[in-house]
Image (cartoon, grey):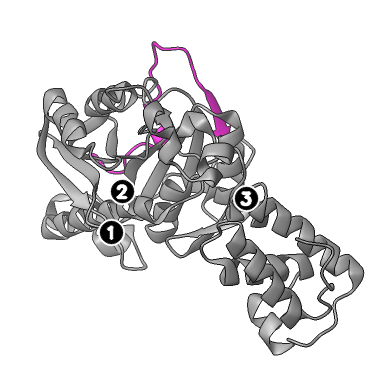
Amino acid sequence: MNGARRKPTTVRELLRVSAAWLAEQGIESADLEAQLLLAEALGCRRIDLFMDHDRPLAPEERDRFRALARRRGQAREPLAYILGRREFFGFEFRVGPAVLVPRPESEHLVEAALEELDRRSLRRERFDGELPHSADEAHPEGESGEGSESGARPRPEAAARADAPSPTEIDAAGGKAGAAAAPSPVRVADVGAGSGCIGIALARLRPEAQVLACDRSAAALAVARENAAALGVAERVRLVHGDLLSFVAAGTLDLVLSNPPYVGEDEVELLSPEVRAHEPREALFDRPGLPLTQRLVEQAHEALAPGGLLAVETGQGSAERVAAFFASAGFAKVRTLRDLAGIERVVLGRRSP
């Protein structure tokens, strides 16, 4: 921001000047972002800016704002990293450079999961007489999960292979797991969890969801742990530092969700400066042919119980290839979901009974 110009002294003036400057730097939603950055600098709500438009700003307040604006306009740091938070599926998640910024496209994974849990609840209600507990007993608030004939399912962490090296398990609450498993839980894996937004949002929305969130990045899991605790689901989210689903025993999951790296190295110049310069490369890029996604699909087929569902987010133009991975691995009923732009964004398949 040009220091030679007359320095704006009020909220109104600073918003006008800074929005124009951000627009010159190539920021698309310059007005909105100027407001969010100023609210952050002042420690107030965005609406408060409009209620006190003509309030004079102290020099230290202007300095704090300029520092944030330069990070956004000159360094092109993602707004979510500057603010330290991003909304996803109606919940606020803490984010930082260790994790991808949650995106609306990934909300389709949560929607697919909710549809699957609804399907399982309906099936449970239809065959309630054959189950050891009624839906009301299992879920006093009215939501019921999928039960097995022998009763409650094991927690996701019980899926670790007995004959494989134990991965580093990180309790979301920062201590040892001691909470009893909820009645008739649905065992969900969020693979490549990052901030945990997918699995944690599902856990917040559905109490029967017992989530295993795994990632290769310990720094990302630290962010996910904070989010699980902040959103009150730490007792139902287990965090595992491991590679995909290599540590999960066969047939022990009901639902696998993943937003794996799917950007090709040859596509780097197509990315925005924010993504290209600031978001973690290991969470973005896969090699030609998407071998990581293929390995995920193969491992998920082994880890899922019969009838279990896999949902994988993918990039524009890649859905056909990923669907072929599903078919080759043995998945049935393979289909795709389109995002709001009409792009085939999620590939789904069911493990045959």
Q: Where does the image place residue 98, in percent across and percent down from the top left?
A: 59, 37
Residue 300 appears in the rendering: yes
Which range of residues does the magenta coloring cover? Answer: 148-172
Residue under pointer 1: 144
Q: In the drawing, does residue 105 fall left or right of residue 34?
A: left
- If the image is split into quadrants, where does the C terminus sit? top left
Let me know if residue 151 is in the magenta part.
yes
Residue 184, labelled with which disc? Answer: 2
Position of 337 with respect to 227 (left or right) is left
In the rendered image, residue 222, in percent from the top left (x then y), is placed at 61, 38
Q: Is residue 342 left or right of residue 260?
A: left
Q: Are marks 2 and 1 in contact (CB under 8 Å)?
A: yes
Going from N to C along the chain, the mark reached first, 2 or 1, is 1
Quadrant of res 26:
bottom right
User: Circle 3 is placed at which residue position?
Assistant: 81
Q: Main secondary structure of the magenta part?
A: loop
User: Residue 330 location in percent, x, y?
Assistant: 12, 26
